[in-house]
Image (cartoon, helix red, strand yellow):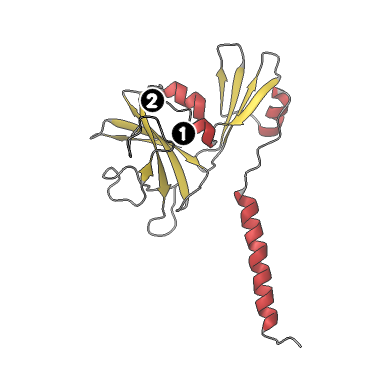
Amino acid sequence: MHSSRSLPLAAGWLLFLVLAGLIAGCASFEPPRPYATEAEALAARGEPTRRWSNDDGTATLEYSTQPNGWTCLMVQVDQGGIVLRQWDALAPENLARVERGMDKEQVSRLLGTHRSEQRFRNSGEEVWDWNIRNDGPGIAVLFNVHFIDDKVVRTSQTYVYPRDGALSGGWGHYAYPWGWGGGWWGYPRPFYPHPFVHPWFW
């Protein structure tokens, strides 16, 4: 005979398992099915954030989800409107393609519309950031591209933590490399190793 106490306990465990399954399902990312034509992509997603013309006569449709999303669908189509390929511009393997010396247009073409930008007078850097998939502590992860004289000098990654409760107006205050953010929490690190990487710089 089961005690009356075991029923609430069993119900609690069942609820926990259901919630864990829902969270795991939300955390997984299912890329959209490949579109066959430009018309199909437009019908499914509407007008793109931007449309890039390529040197080979093709075009790339950009579907950014910034500032709060963490994907950016790129759909390349030929002159006849046939889809050649599609990919997530904010996938880790694409973030790794950011190279020192790239200009701003090259970075925009590669990663899509950025979330925000800041200038730092002491370092002379202008920093663009993108909200990306959260694989660490905190409430979000930002991928940062640092420019000096409009050229990429390095990248970093920032974990975003709430300050004084819930944040409003996007992510609110977040951390950049030590000493730049007025003591805000978080820390950056290079997103990918590089052959000549310094612990904190490209």
Q: Residue furthest left?
A: 122
Residue 106 on image: x %, y %? 46, 22
Instruction: Answer with mark 2 or mark 1, whichever residue precedes in sequence.
Output: 2
Q: Amino acid at mark 1?
A: His
Label 1: which secondary element: loop
Residue 6 on image: x %, y %? 68, 82
Work out which quarter of the rendered image holds the N terminus and state it. bottom right
Check the image and report above or below for 57 versus 137. above
Label of residue 196 in the image:
none
Q: Is 99 displayed left or right of 65 in the figure?
A: left
Check the image and report above or below for 6 versus 28. below
Residue sitting at x 66%, y 33%? 45
Q: Quadrant of residue 24?
A: bottom right
Residue mark closest to the camera, 2 vs 1: 2
Query: Few, some or many C-alpha atoms within 10 Å of disc 2 (few <14, some 14-19, many ≥20)?
Result: some
Q: Is 73 displayed left or right of 118 in the figure?
A: right
Residue position for label 2: 100
Residue sitting at x 69%, y 28%? 41
Label of residue 114 in the image:
1
Residue sitting at x 42%, y 35%? 193
Q: Residue furthest front?
A: 195
